[in-house]
Each structure stands twice: as structure tokens, then as C-alpha cells.
Image (cartoon, helix red, strand yellow):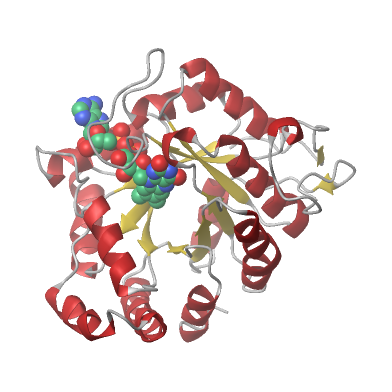
Amino acid sequence: MEASNGPQRSPAGLFLGGYPISRGLDFFNDSSIMPTMQFIRDIYAAKQASNRPVISFEFFPPKTEEGDRNLLEKTIPALKQLQPDFCSVTYGAGGSTREKTLMIVDRIQRTHGITGMAHLTCVGSTQEQIGEVLDQARALGIRNILALRGDPPGGTGKFKKTEGGFEFSYQLVQFIRQKGGFSIGTAGFPEGHIACQEGKLVDWERLKAKIDCGADFVLTQLFFDNADFFVFREYMAKKLGVTVSITPGILPILSAAQVKRFTEMCGARMPAPLLARLEPLRDHDEAATEFGIEYATKQCEELLREGVPGLHIYTLNKARSAAQLLKNLRLA
Ligand SMILES: Cc1cc2nc3c(=O)[nH]c(=O)nc-3n(C[C@H](O)[C@H](O)[C@H](O)COP(=O)(O)OP(=O)(O)OC[C@H]3O[C@@H](n4cnc5c(N)ncnc54)[C@H](O)[C@@H]3O)c2cc1C
């Protein structure tokens, strides 16, 4: 366990120079003192000891100023009321959101006092550049990184290693561990990673390798059949001897077309009964959202009964479904 360093101060103007963020959003309040944030591995340990699930929300960096305002001034403040244990912010395809990811995590931590986690990928970056991002994260008091390989820009085709960069996320995990000072998360795939042609068991062995390299906890890809998660969890724990927490990633569906797009991209299976329920809702996002809450509630009820260490909720930057889901589960 690493020691706390006491209150930290934002480094003045670290990113403000090149960042086209909407004026008046007050991303960096240089005079603010931020309480030291927790390592996520410690959050899981404490919650496990008190037999309560770790609740986390995932956001993505918006592409527009309106999106920034919605996320920062509406969604995050609304979800803060639910007292999440931590919030994470994705790293855009091709590393395109590098600075914005860190800035939103900074905002989550500094303004809202919630422990944050920055996602970080290997895409389009040399080791040196990744090292710089980690230095910037550290300077902002960010103590948690989700270490990912990332997808090829555009989301399709074969991943190409950048010269001087990393080919697989286990190398990024090793690199961050060597640097020290972060709790490291890694991605797990209950149905196997889409690009792993050798099959899911090989992919799960590679996940074990990431953990052996220093990952402290696993967050999973979205899935819609809990049986897939249970088989995966059992294999990781019983066959591979993994002891770190493996937390399911839950997507409350917002729209039939959107979820089909997502699942095609990441290779997650949609069970036939789910597809049948969604079919008549194709052009009715409001009804699809209601159904998504109902489906996610049932999914999470079973997962919690079966002792998952937490729920990582893909919010898609919207508060309503995540909030209703936690209320239904009596976790809010
Ligand atoms: C919770 C979560 C959050 C995510 N957040 C983001 C994000 O913010 N930004 C983003 O761009 N993407 C994100 N992704 C998507 C992720 O980057 C992609 O799924 C990516 O294709 C795989 O990343 P990884 O870290 O699992 O890669 P890796 O662990 O490197 O695995 C990638 C592929 O390589 C194979 N492999 C691993 N090791 C070896 C080896 N030694 N030899 C041969 N093959 C190997 C694996 O089986 C797999 O098929 C997220 C995924 C999850 C589950």
C-alpha cells in the first residue's frame, strides 16, 4: 500500500494553454486545495470488508461545448448525489482526448471531491509520451489509471503499435507499475476479446498476465447474459488463481440502434430474448431507455446476489438511467 501525500495543489496552467474548452467552465481553479484521493484498490478492499458493493460511473469526454456543459454542470452533479465510490473518464480513440480526459478527471476530483480514474491507451503514443501523460496525471493528484491497449483509430482494422510505443496493455501495466504511485485497473472480457482468435480461454490467460504485471483490479466489457460473466469469473478465480476484484461493466440500454452498434463493435452478444424485446422499440428511444433500466436492474440484482465486488456503470454521460438503476437496487 502506498502512503498518502497530503493535500495537493493544481499546477498552474498545466494544460490550459492548448485546450479549447468552453470559457467559464472553470476547469482549473488553481487556488483550490484538493483532498488526497484514494487508490481504487483500497476502495475495493474497504468495501469488501464492509460487504458493500463499489459503485463507479464511467464518462467520456464530450466533443462539443454543449456536451461539456451537460456533463460537467448536469450529469456529474446529478450523479454525485448517489455518492459513487469513484468515477472514470475514457481516453478517446487514437489518444485524441488526452488532455481533456485528465481535465475532466481533475474536475471530478477537485470540484466534486470524488475519486477519479483516467483511462489511458497505447494508441498513437510513444513510451515517452505516455510517461508525460502519467506525469501530468500525477501532478493533478490523479492516483488511478485504467491501462488499456485501445482500439485502432476509427475502431476497426488491426491495431498497429506506434514506433517506440506498446503493443499490448500488459506492457503499459508494467510501465505504470515501474513508475509507481498509481493503482492500476485493466479491462476484462467475459466473452473473450473480439480480436482474440485463439478463443476466450487464451484471452483470459492474457488477462491473468496483465494482473501478474501489476494490475490491481479488473473492470469488464459490457455483457447482457450474466452466465457469461459467471463462467469468466469462475475460470479466472478457480483455474487461474486470480484474487483481484473483477467488477462487471453494466450498460443500461438507451436506444436499440445504439446498443446494436456498440455490441457489433466490441463483440458482445445480445441474447435472443433481449433482441426480441428491443425489436419493437427500434424507433422509440424513450421506451428503450425504460426497458434498459428494467433489464439492467434485473441483471444487477442477480450479480449482487452472486457477490460481485461492485458495479461499473457505463453512463454514456447521462444521469437518468444510472440514477434510477441504483434507486431500484436500493443503493441510492
Ligand atoms: C472497462 C473498459 C474501458 C475501456 N476504455 C477505453 C478507453 O477509454 N479508450 C479506448 O480507446 N478503449 C477503451 N476500451 C476498449 C479497449 O481499449 C479495447 O477493447 C482494446 O481492443 C483492448 O484493450 P485491452 O487493454 O484489453 O488490450 P490487450 O490486453 O492488449 O489485449 C488486446 C488483444 O491482444 C491480445 N493479447 C494480449 N496480450 C497478448 C500477447 N502477449 N500476445 C498476443 N496477443 C495478446 C488479447 O487477447 C486481445 O485480443 C475499454 C474497454 C473496457 C472493457
**Residue at coordinates 57% horizontally, 46% vertically from top-left?**
117
Residue 233 in the image: state x and y as whole percent.
Answer: 25, 56
Task: Find the residue positioned furthest to the right.
Answer: 31
**Quarter of the rendering occupied by the N terminus:** top right
Residue 97 in the image: state x and y as whole percent.
Answer: 54, 39
In the displayed structure, 135 sits above or below 44; it is above
Residue 85 in the image: state x and y as whole percent.
Answer: 59, 61
* Residue 190 visible in the displayed image: no
Asked if residue 97 lies left or right of residue 246, the reply is right
* Residue 282 visible in the displayed image: yes
**Residue at coordinates 62% horizontally, 35% vertically from top-left?**
2
**Residue at coordinates 80% horizontally, 32% vertically from top-left?**
11
Task: Find the residue positioned furthest to the left.
Answer: 198
Task: Find the residue positioned furthest to the top.
Answer: 164
Q: State the residue in front, 232 or 30.
A: 30
Q: State the residue in front, 67 or 266.
A: 67
In the displayed structure, 27 sits above or below 14; it is below
Residue 322 in the image: state x and y as whole percent.
Answer: 50, 73
State ligand 1's quadrant. Answer: top left
Q: Tag count in the figure?
A: 0
Q: State the residue in front, 116 or 41.
A: 116
**Quarter of the rendering occupied by the C terminus:** bottom right
Asked if residue 50 lies left or right of residue 121, the reply is right
**Residue at coordinates 58% horizontally, 57% vertically from top-left?**
86
Asked if residue 258 lies left or right of residue 65, the reply is left
